[in-house]
Image (cartoon, grey):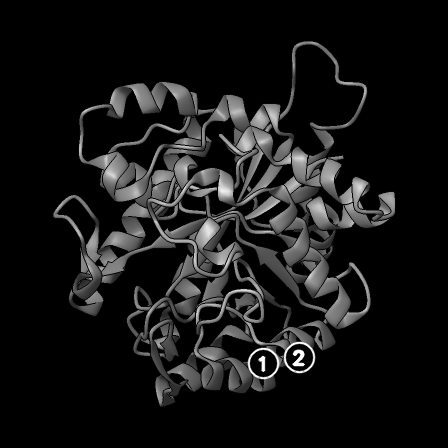
Amino acid sequence: MIIVDAHEDLAWNARSFGRDYTRSAHETRQREEGTEIPRLNGRCMLGLPEWLAGRVAVIFATVFVMPARHARSAMERTYRTPDEAYAEGMAQLDYYERLTETQPRFRWIRSRRDLEAVLETWREPLPEPDPRCIGIVCLMEGADPIRRPEEVEVWYERGVRIIGPAWSATRYAGGTGEPGPLTDEGRRLLKVMQDFPLILDLSHMAERSFFEALERYERPVIASHSNPQALVPGDRQLSDAMIRALAERDGVIGVVLSNRMLKKGWTRGDPKEAVTVWDVVRAIDYICQRVGDARHVGIGSDFDGGFGAEETPAEFDTVADLPKIADALRQAGFAEADVEAVMGGNWLRILRHGLE
């Protein structure tokens, strides 16, 4: 079994905080002791040794630029204008290019052929030396780096394969904490996106923009990192109606491993141990129960996405612990085929359908 994690903010962390993801997460923690970084982004959970140990073969790695109105520190990469968002987004793509060109363990996935080549390196039994590679699928989280819809082609040619129009509100759509519909530019964005083999990410979209985008967009759709609203209320989560609508389009929802999104009332500073892997299973099972199968849920950990190890369930210290979800699903009575689907197979189906 291999694992696909549908949301990790690698480039933003590397450029904002200098995190080197070719190192171990534990080494990064040691390097950051006594700095402002753990307060801002938590204790690092990601690193090459941990991805390999956790059998994480594919990552949806983001291009994410924070709107200046949400900045917490001068360290964070932010934007005030479309040109600033564009420049930082392109710099993050440069980061992924350098990573995949200089580090043989990382490969950029732009096509189905690239995907299968990465998966082939994980075939058992593994020969010596260890051939395993981490595949990077580039996901734009918040579309403001696209200065005008016609620029989608530029980003596609640079390697972006998934676009989420919103984080907070953008010029294209209402988003988390800033509700609203698709804008006229947002409708044009979706129209242009359909000319390319791009996947639409509905995470962070406000309810009105979510449903309109789902109706308008005909290519594959996902919610890369979203949890059920019924378990933790708030507009960051998905209502039952949103979950069902996405499943009707054969989409997949990535469950986030943030304690604040797994247990109602948990806040930063509460005991880590108050949330466990069984809360993760509860969120996964809730989605399965709403849609009637295990075909529409996966993992979108969002590790290092504004929180760290101290804000994840008790059993999780780094990304190497993701297989514990599979163990818990088995204990909960999930069939092995469903466990494999949740841990990676559902995302692979989306990629095989959405990539060319």
| Disc on res. 25 | none
Q: Residue furthest top?
A: 128
Q: Position of residue 44 (x, y in %)?
A: 38, 32
270 w.r.t. 235: above or below: above
Q: Quadrant of residue 114?
A: top right
Say which element carries label 2: helix
Q: Is residue 124 left or right of residue 352?
A: right
Q: Is residue 272 left or right of residue 344?
A: left
Q: Nearer the viewer, residue 351 or 213?
A: 213
Q: Quadrant of residue 292?
A: bottom right
Residue at horizontal 56%, vertical 76%?
A: 194
Tally the numbered discs.
2
Image quarter in which the N terminus is found: top right
Residue type for callout 2: Ala
Image quarter in which the C terminus is found: bottom right
Mark 1 and mark 2 residues within 8 Å of each other at the beta carbon: yes
| Disc on res. 214 | 1
Residue at horizontal 21%, vertical 62%?
A: 70
Say which element carries label 1: helix
Q: Is residue 92 left or right of residue 118?
A: left
